[in-house]
Amino acid sequence: MIANLNVCIIGKPNVGKSTIFNKITDCSISKVSEISGTTIYPIELSKEFKDLKINLIDLGGLKKKSKSYKYKQKLINIETLKKLNISDVVLFILDGSDEITKNDKQLFRLILNKLKNIIVIVNKTDLIKENLKKKEEYFKFFFEKNFPNILLKPIFISALKNIKRDFLLKKLYDIYINSKKLIKNKDTNLVLKNIISKHQPVFNKRSRPTIKFLRQVNSKPIIFKAFGNRLTSLSKDYKNFFVKQVLIQLKIYNQISIIKFINNKNPYS
Ligand SMILES: Nc1nc2c(ncn2[C@@H]2O[C@H](COP(=O)(O)OP(=O)(O)OP(=O)(O)O)[C@@H](O)[C@H]2O)c(=O)[nH]1
Ligand SMILES: [Mg+2]
Protein backbone atom coordinates (compact mmCIF):
# COMPACT_ATOMS: atom_id res chain seq x y z
CA MET A 1 0.00 0.00 0.00
CA ILE A 2 1.26 3.45 -0.86
CA ALA A 3 1.47 5.96 2.01
CA ASN A 4 0.58 9.62 1.85
CA LEU A 5 2.65 12.54 3.13
CA ASN A 6 1.14 16.03 3.15
CA VAL A 7 3.87 18.61 2.65
CA CYS A 8 3.01 22.30 2.64
CA ILE A 9 5.20 25.18 1.54
CA ILE A 10 5.09 28.06 3.99
CA GLY A 11 6.82 31.41 4.20
CA LYS A 12 6.18 35.10 4.05
CA PRO A 13 5.03 36.61 0.71
CA ASN A 14 7.36 36.62 -2.32
CA VAL A 15 10.12 34.32 -1.01
CA GLY A 16 9.72 31.94 -3.97
CA LYS A 17 7.25 29.34 -2.66
CA SER A 18 5.40 28.90 -5.97
CA THR A 19 8.67 28.77 -7.92
CA ILE A 20 9.84 25.97 -5.61
CA PHE A 21 6.49 24.16 -5.96
CA ASN A 22 6.67 24.29 -9.76
CA LYS A 23 10.27 23.11 -9.86
CA ILE A 24 9.74 20.19 -7.48
CA THR A 25 6.62 18.99 -9.29
CA ASP A 26 8.17 19.75 -12.68
CA CYS A 27 5.25 21.79 -13.99
CA SER A 28 4.15 25.40 -14.02
CA ILE A 29 0.63 25.30 -12.61
CA SER A 30 1.26 27.77 -9.79
CA LYS A 31 1.47 31.41 -10.81
CA VAL A 32 4.78 33.12 -10.12
CA SER A 33 5.25 36.88 -10.05
CA GLU A 34 7.39 39.55 -8.43
CA ILE A 35 4.26 40.99 -6.80
CA SER A 36 3.64 39.92 -3.17
CA GLY A 37 0.37 38.10 -2.56
CA THR A 38 0.23 36.25 -5.89
CA THR A 39 -0.90 32.90 -4.49
CA ILE A 40 -4.21 33.12 -2.68
CA TYR A 41 -5.78 29.63 -2.73
CA PRO A 42 -3.78 26.44 -2.08
CA ILE A 43 -2.53 24.52 -5.11
CA GLU A 44 -1.80 20.80 -4.72
CA LEU A 45 -0.02 18.16 -6.77
CA SER A 46 1.26 14.69 -5.90
CA LYS A 47 4.67 13.28 -6.61
CA GLU A 48 5.62 9.66 -6.05
CA PHE A 49 8.91 8.79 -4.41
CA LYS A 50 9.66 5.15 -3.57
CA ASP A 51 6.57 3.84 -1.69
CA LEU A 52 5.43 7.33 -0.79
CA LYS A 53 2.94 9.69 -2.39
CA ILE A 54 4.07 13.19 -1.53
CA ASN A 55 1.18 15.61 -1.71
CA LEU A 56 2.84 18.99 -2.19
CA ILE A 57 0.78 22.06 -1.32
CA ASP A 58 1.71 25.58 -2.42
CA LEU A 59 0.26 28.26 -0.18
CA GLY A 60 -0.15 32.00 -0.06
CA GLY A 61 2.41 33.99 1.93
CA LEU A 62 1.46 34.37 5.58
CA LYS A 63 1.47 37.75 7.25
CA LYS A 64 0.32 38.64 10.74
CA LYS A 65 -2.47 41.13 11.31
CA SER A 66 -1.32 44.71 10.89
CA LYS A 67 -2.73 48.13 10.05
CA SER A 68 -2.56 47.26 6.38
CA TYR A 69 -4.35 43.94 6.97
CA LYS A 70 -6.54 43.65 3.90
CA TYR A 71 -9.39 41.30 3.01
CA LYS A 72 -7.14 39.45 0.54
CA GLN A 73 -4.44 38.79 3.18
CA LYS A 74 -7.11 37.61 5.62
CA LEU A 75 -8.34 35.09 3.05
CA ILE A 76 -4.75 33.92 2.38
CA ASN A 77 -4.11 33.44 6.10
CA ILE A 78 -7.31 31.42 6.61
CA GLU A 79 -6.62 29.12 3.63
CA THR A 80 -2.96 28.68 4.55
CA LEU A 81 -3.62 27.87 8.21
CA LYS A 82 -6.20 25.22 7.24
CA LYS A 83 -3.58 23.40 5.17
CA LEU A 84 -0.85 23.86 7.79
CA ASN A 85 -3.06 22.02 10.28
CA ILE A 86 -3.38 18.92 8.10
CA SER A 87 0.26 18.81 6.97
CA ASP A 88 2.85 16.24 8.07
CA VAL A 89 5.87 18.29 7.06
CA VAL A 90 6.41 21.97 6.40
CA LEU A 91 8.91 23.32 3.90
CA PHE A 92 9.67 26.64 5.55
CA ILE A 93 11.04 29.09 3.01
CA LEU A 94 13.28 32.06 3.76
CA ASP A 95 14.72 34.70 1.44
CA GLY A 96 18.52 34.27 1.45
CA SER A 97 19.11 37.76 0.06
CA ASP A 98 17.45 39.26 3.15
CA GLU A 99 17.89 39.07 6.92
CA ILE A 100 15.54 36.93 9.03
CA THR A 101 12.59 39.25 9.68
CA LYS A 102 10.08 39.53 12.51
CA ASN A 103 7.48 38.00 10.20
CA ASP A 104 9.76 34.98 9.55
CA LYS A 105 10.26 34.47 13.30
CA GLN A 106 6.53 34.67 14.06
CA LEU A 107 5.76 32.20 11.30
CA PHE A 108 8.43 29.79 12.41
CA ARG A 109 7.13 29.79 16.00
CA LEU A 110 3.61 29.20 14.76
CA ILE A 111 4.74 26.08 12.88
CA LEU A 112 6.77 24.82 15.86
CA ASN A 113 3.84 25.34 18.22
CA LYS A 114 1.79 23.07 15.99
CA LEU A 115 4.51 20.41 16.47
CA LYS A 116 5.12 20.07 12.75
CA ASN A 117 8.20 18.52 11.20
CA ILE A 118 10.12 21.24 9.41
CA ILE A 119 12.66 21.52 6.61
CA VAL A 120 14.16 25.00 6.36
CA ILE A 121 14.96 26.16 2.84
CA VAL A 122 16.89 29.36 2.25
CA ASN A 123 16.06 30.43 -1.31
CA LYS A 124 17.42 33.05 -3.73
CA THR A 125 21.07 32.32 -2.92
CA ASP A 126 21.94 33.67 -6.39
CA LEU A 127 21.08 37.13 -5.08
CA ILE A 128 23.43 36.99 -2.09
CA LYS A 129 26.06 39.66 -2.65
CA GLU A 130 28.07 39.36 0.56
CA ASN A 131 30.27 36.41 1.57
CA LEU A 132 28.16 33.28 1.04
CA LYS A 133 29.80 31.32 3.90
CA LYS A 134 29.08 34.14 6.35
CA LYS A 135 25.46 34.29 5.26
CA GLU A 136 25.11 30.51 5.64
CA GLU A 137 26.56 30.74 9.15
CA TYR A 138 24.04 33.48 9.99
CA PHE A 139 21.05 31.28 9.08
CA LYS A 140 22.52 28.12 10.70
CA PHE A 141 23.33 29.98 13.92
CA PHE A 142 19.80 31.39 14.18
CA PHE A 143 18.20 27.92 14.22
CA GLU A 144 20.90 26.31 16.39
CA LYS A 145 20.71 28.98 19.05
CA ASN A 146 17.00 29.59 19.41
CA PHE A 147 15.26 26.22 19.28
CA PRO A 148 16.43 23.40 21.59
CA ASN A 149 13.70 20.96 20.53
CA ILE A 150 14.61 20.58 16.88
CA LEU A 151 17.79 20.15 14.86
CA LEU A 152 17.70 22.03 11.60
CA LYS A 153 20.28 22.27 8.89
CA PRO A 154 18.97 24.91 6.49
CA ILE A 155 19.18 23.88 2.84
CA PHE A 156 20.49 26.64 0.57
CA ILE A 157 19.05 26.78 -2.93
CA SER A 158 18.34 29.02 -5.84
CA ALA A 159 14.99 27.81 -7.14
CA LEU A 160 15.74 29.54 -10.42
CA LYS A 161 19.10 27.83 -10.91
CA ASN A 162 19.20 24.59 -8.92
CA ILE A 163 16.26 23.20 -6.95
CA LYS A 164 18.12 20.10 -5.53
CA ARG A 165 14.93 18.10 -6.09
CA ASP A 166 16.23 14.60 -5.29
CA PHE A 167 17.98 15.83 -2.16
CA LEU A 168 14.73 17.42 -0.91
CA LEU A 169 12.62 14.36 -1.73
CA LYS A 170 15.09 12.15 0.15
CA LYS A 171 14.84 14.43 3.21
CA LEU A 172 11.04 14.15 3.11
CA TYR A 173 11.31 10.39 2.80
CA ASP A 174 13.64 10.21 5.84
CA ILE A 175 11.11 12.14 7.93
CA TYR A 176 8.35 9.75 6.82
CA ILE A 177 10.44 6.71 7.81
CA ASN A 178 11.41 8.20 11.19
CA SER A 179 7.80 9.09 11.97
CA LYS A 180 6.92 5.42 11.81
CA LYS A 181 9.54 3.88 14.07
CA LEU A 182 10.46 3.89 17.73
CA ILE A 183 14.13 3.83 18.74
CA LYS A 184 15.06 0.81 20.87
CA ASN A 185 15.44 1.31 24.64
CA LYS A 186 18.95 -0.15 24.40
CA ASP A 187 19.97 2.73 22.11
CA THR A 188 18.20 5.51 24.01
CA ASN A 189 19.77 4.32 27.26
CA LEU A 190 23.21 4.29 25.69
CA VAL A 191 22.67 7.90 24.66
CA LEU A 192 21.56 8.72 28.20
CA LYS A 193 24.78 7.22 29.56
CA ASN A 194 26.86 9.28 27.13
CA ILE A 195 25.11 12.51 28.05
CA ILE A 196 25.46 11.94 31.79
CA SER A 197 29.17 11.13 31.40
CA LYS A 198 29.62 14.45 29.58
CA HIS A 199 27.59 16.61 31.88
CA GLN A 200 25.61 15.59 34.97
CA PRO A 201 22.72 17.63 36.34
CA VAL A 202 23.93 20.05 39.02
CA PHE A 203 23.26 19.57 42.73
CA ASN A 204 20.09 21.04 44.12
CA LYS A 205 20.72 21.83 47.80
CA ARG A 206 22.40 18.60 48.91
CA SER A 207 21.09 16.13 46.39
CA ARG A 208 21.63 15.68 42.69
CA PRO A 209 18.81 14.94 40.24
CA THR A 210 19.50 11.62 38.51
CA ILE A 211 18.12 10.39 35.21
CA LYS A 212 18.02 6.59 35.07
CA PHE A 213 16.12 5.57 31.95
CA LEU A 214 15.27 7.14 28.66
CA ARG A 215 12.72 5.74 26.27
CA GLN A 216 10.85 6.89 23.20
CA VAL A 217 7.09 6.59 23.66
CA ASN A 218 5.74 8.27 20.51
CA SER A 219 6.99 8.92 17.01
CA LYS A 220 4.61 11.50 15.58
CA PRO A 221 5.42 13.85 17.19
CA ILE A 222 8.53 12.39 18.77
CA ILE A 223 8.13 12.09 22.54
CA PHE A 224 10.67 10.64 24.96
CA LYS A 225 10.21 9.97 28.64
CA ALA A 226 13.15 10.36 31.00
CA PHE A 227 12.68 8.61 34.35
CA GLY A 228 14.65 9.31 37.50
CA ASN A 229 14.82 10.94 40.91
CA ARG A 230 14.43 14.56 41.98
CA LEU A 231 13.78 15.57 38.36
CA THR A 232 11.50 18.45 39.33
CA SER A 233 14.64 20.33 40.31
CA LEU A 234 16.29 20.01 36.89
CA SER A 235 17.08 23.44 35.51
CA LYS A 236 15.63 24.68 32.22
CA ASP A 237 19.16 25.03 30.86
CA TYR A 238 19.96 21.42 31.66
CA LYS A 239 16.71 20.22 30.08
CA ASN A 240 17.49 22.19 26.91
CA PHE A 241 21.02 20.80 26.84
CA PHE A 242 19.67 17.29 27.38
CA VAL A 243 17.09 17.46 24.55
CA LYS A 244 19.64 18.85 22.13
CA GLN A 245 22.15 16.12 23.01
CA VAL A 246 19.54 13.39 22.55
CA LEU A 247 18.72 14.75 19.09
CA ILE A 248 22.38 15.11 18.09
CA GLN A 249 23.38 11.64 19.28
CA LEU A 250 20.36 9.93 17.74
CA LYS A 251 20.74 12.05 14.59
CA ILE A 252 17.12 13.23 14.63
CA TYR A 253 16.89 16.11 12.19
CA ASN A 254 13.86 18.19 11.11
CA GLN A 255 11.56 16.65 13.73
CA ILE A 256 10.37 18.47 16.79
CA SER A 257 10.98 16.34 19.88
CA ILE A 258 9.66 16.57 23.39
CA ILE A 259 11.16 15.01 26.52
CA LYS A 260 8.97 14.52 29.56
CA PHE A 261 10.94 14.22 32.80
CA ILE A 262 9.19 11.85 35.17
CA ASN A 263 10.03 11.24 38.81
CA ASN A 264 10.69 7.89 40.46
CA LYS A 265 8.99 5.52 38.12
CA ASN A 266 10.14 2.27 36.74
CA PRO A 267 9.46 2.47 32.97
CA TYR A 268 9.44 -1.32 32.66
CA SER A 269 6.73 -1.93 35.24
N1 LIG B 1 16.73 35.66 -8.09
C1 LIG B 1 15.84 34.76 -7.74
N2 LIG B 1 14.52 35.03 -7.82
C2 LIG B 1 13.65 34.08 -7.43
C3 LIG B 1 14.06 32.81 -6.95
N3 LIG B 1 12.94 32.10 -6.64
C4 LIG B 1 11.90 32.89 -6.95
N4 LIG B 1 12.29 34.08 -7.44
C5 LIG B 1 11.49 35.22 -7.88
O1 LIG B 1 10.83 35.78 -6.76
C6 LIG B 1 9.55 36.29 -7.14
C7 LIG B 1 8.46 35.66 -6.26
O2 LIG B 1 8.37 34.28 -6.58
P1 LIG B 1 7.07 33.41 -6.23
O3 LIG B 1 7.44 31.99 -6.48
O4 LIG B 1 5.87 33.97 -6.90
O5 LIG B 1 6.99 33.70 -4.66
P2 LIG B 1 5.85 33.24 -3.61
O6 LIG B 1 6.54 33.01 -2.32
O7 LIG B 1 5.05 32.13 -4.17
O8 LIG B 1 4.98 34.57 -3.52
P3 LIG B 1 3.46 34.77 -2.97
O9 LIG B 1 2.59 33.73 -3.59
O10 LIG B 1 3.12 36.14 -3.43
O11 LIG B 1 3.54 34.68 -1.49
C8 LIG B 1 9.40 35.97 -8.64
O12 LIG B 1 9.76 37.12 -9.35
C9 LIG B 1 10.37 34.83 -8.84
O13 LIG B 1 10.86 34.77 -10.19
C10 LIG B 1 15.47 32.55 -6.85
O14 LIG B 1 15.94 31.50 -6.42
N5 LIG B 1 16.30 33.57 -7.25
MG1 LIG C 1 3.04 32.00 -4.57
Image (cartoon, grey):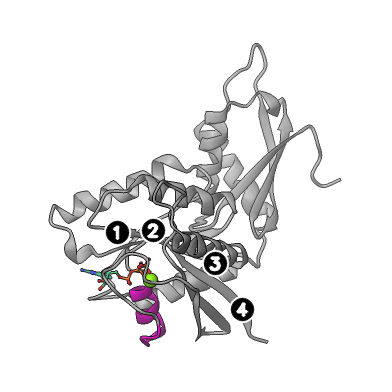
Q: Mark 2 or mark 3: which comes first in sequence?
A: 2
Assess whether residue 87 is covered by the magenta stretch. no
- Give residue 55's position: percent from left, percent from top: 54, 79
Mark 4, residue position: 4
Q: Secondary structure at mark 1?
A: strand
Can you tell which of label 4 and label 2 is closer to the viewer?
2
Can you tell which of label 1 and label 3 is closer to the viewer?
3
Q: Mark 4 or mark 1: which comes first in sequence?
A: 4
Q: Is residue 208 left or right of residue 55?
A: right
Give the answer, above or below, for where 233 lies relative to 129: above
- Give residue 95's position: percent from left, percent from top: 29, 59
Which SS type dominates the magenta stretch? helix
Q: Mark 1 or mark 2: which comes first in sequence?
A: 2
Give the answer, above or below, for where 152 lies relative to 147: below
Cβ of disc 2 within 8 Å of ligand 1?
A: yes
Badge 3, how many Cα within 10 Å: few under 14, some, many 20+?
A: some
Q: Secondary structure at mark 2?
A: loop
Callout 4 amino acid: Asn
Q: Mark 1 or mark 3: which comes first in sequence?
A: 3
Q: Is residue 93 left or right of residue 1?
A: left
Q: Mark 4 or mark 2: which comes first in sequence?
A: 4
- Give residue 247's position: percent from left, percent from top: 52, 50
Callout 1 amino acid: Asp
| Image marks 1 and 2: residues in contact by CB distance under 8 Å | yes
Mark 1, residue position: 95
What's the distance in space between the residues labelled 1 and 2, CA to CA? 9 Å
What's the distance in space between the residues labelled 4 and 1, CA to CA? 29 Å
Q: Secondary structure at mark 3?
A: helix
Which segment did they paint magenta?
A: 18-29
Callout 2 amino acid: Lys
Badge 2, how many Cα within 10 Å: few under 14, some, many 20+?
A: many
